[in-house]
Amino acid sequence: MSLYFIDGQFTKQDEVKISIDDRGYYFGDGVYEVIKVYDGELFTADEHIERLFASAEKIQLTIPYDRAGVMGIARRLIVDNELVNGHIYMQVTRGASPRQHHFPTPTVPAILTAYTMTGERPLAAMEKGVAVKSVEDIRWLRCDIKSLNLLGSVLAKEEAKAGGYEEAILHRDGTVTEGSSTNMFGIKDGIVRTHPVTNLILEGITRQVVLQICDELNIPVEEKPFTLEEAFEMDEMFYTSTTAEVMPIARVDDKIIDDGLRGALTKKIQDAFATKIPLLNKEGRV
């Protein structure tokens, strides 16, 4: 039986209780993070926790623990649940209060929930590549906040999945922003392109690692928007996320990217990413 953390207590999964008045349930009034675990070790946890606090600050939400406290909760969940490979999900809501749109008056305690999930690296897909479907980006204008308001992303992901695609590539009036739960990258003439950090995208932690890798390998990068039409003409494409790592894109809609195979530069970035995670020592490169 898995151990969860909720509202200040570690408890078994079948004993978890969530109030009907939790504002996360009513309004999606909260923020969240997903932290990867490789071989029992947290990966880029400081960056994820820092982003959790940054998102909370943007919606005027006070997390009831400091950063060390959140880290301690994550580490105990790994140990007690004997997690080897997978991730930790964390969310903070504004707390339980009778339904009203404005913030509770007086303020009620925020509620932190956390639990673990198992999951292996998607090695087969990372070698073969996946197909993505273009979907109009109809989300709100604060995509830089990792909030619980994910209906726009859910609808985009469902449209992609229903068509047999792995992910949605979102665009606003033809300009690619990001994926439904990922950051998008294109490669043209040896230059890596990706949307700059604005309110229109979430600054992904894996995105940050990839940009660091490009700097280390002297791979030129342009944080500059590109259009859907330009995406069709890319030499290589990939997307990044905590769970997908660096995922090659073989096809956008019905357009094969180059020859439909994982590109050499994408693989170079994948291999460099793998050297940064502890699991490499047991599993090797892809």
Image (cartoon, helix red, strand yellow):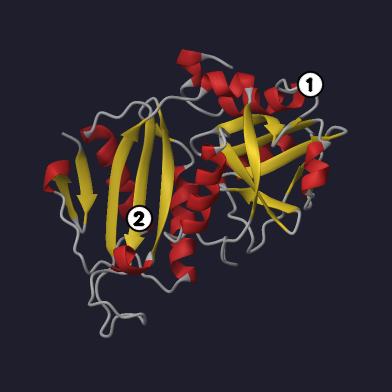
Query: From where the camera sits, is residue 192 visible?
Result: no
Query: From where the camera sits, is residue 259 visible?
Result: yes
The image quadrant of residue 8 is bottom left
Q: Position of residue 224 (x, y in %)?
A: 79, 52
Q: Position of residue 104 (x, y in %)?
A: 29, 80
Say what amino acid the circle numbered 2 marks.
Answer: Gln
Q: Residue at x 49, y 62 (%)?
A: 54
User: Which element carries disc 1, helix, strand or loop?
Assistant: loop
Q: Position of residue 129 (x, y in %)?
A: 63, 25
Q: From what the image shows, is residue 96 above or below residue 179?
A: below
Determine whether, in the image, residue 116 is placed left or right of residue 198: left
Question: Is residue 182 or residue 242 the one in the foreground?
Answer: 182
Q: Residue at x 53, y 20 (%)?
A: 123
The numbered disc on residue 259 is 1
Say what amino acid the circle numbered 1 marks.
Answer: Asp
Considering every residue shown, the one lying at the far left of the view is 15
Q: Residue at x 28, y 43 (%)?
A: 115
The image quadrant of residue 185 is top right
CB under 8 Å between discs 2 and 1: no
The image quadrant of residue 182 is top right
Tell me the CA gap for discs 2 and 1: 41 Å
User: Which element carries disc 2, helix, strand or loop?
Assistant: strand
Q: Classify the position of the C terminus by image quarter.
A: top right
Q: Which residue is the site of mark 2? A: 91
Determine whether, in the image, residue 124 is placed left or right of residue 119: right
Considering every residue shown, the one lying at the far bottom of the view is 105
Q: From what the image shows, is residue 223 above or below residue 56?
A: above
Determine whether, in the image, residue 209 is placed left or right of residue 192: left
Considering every residue shown, the one lying at the far front of the view is 163
Q: Classify the position of the N terminus by image quarter.
A: top left
Determine whether, in the image, residue 34 is placed left or right of residue 177: left
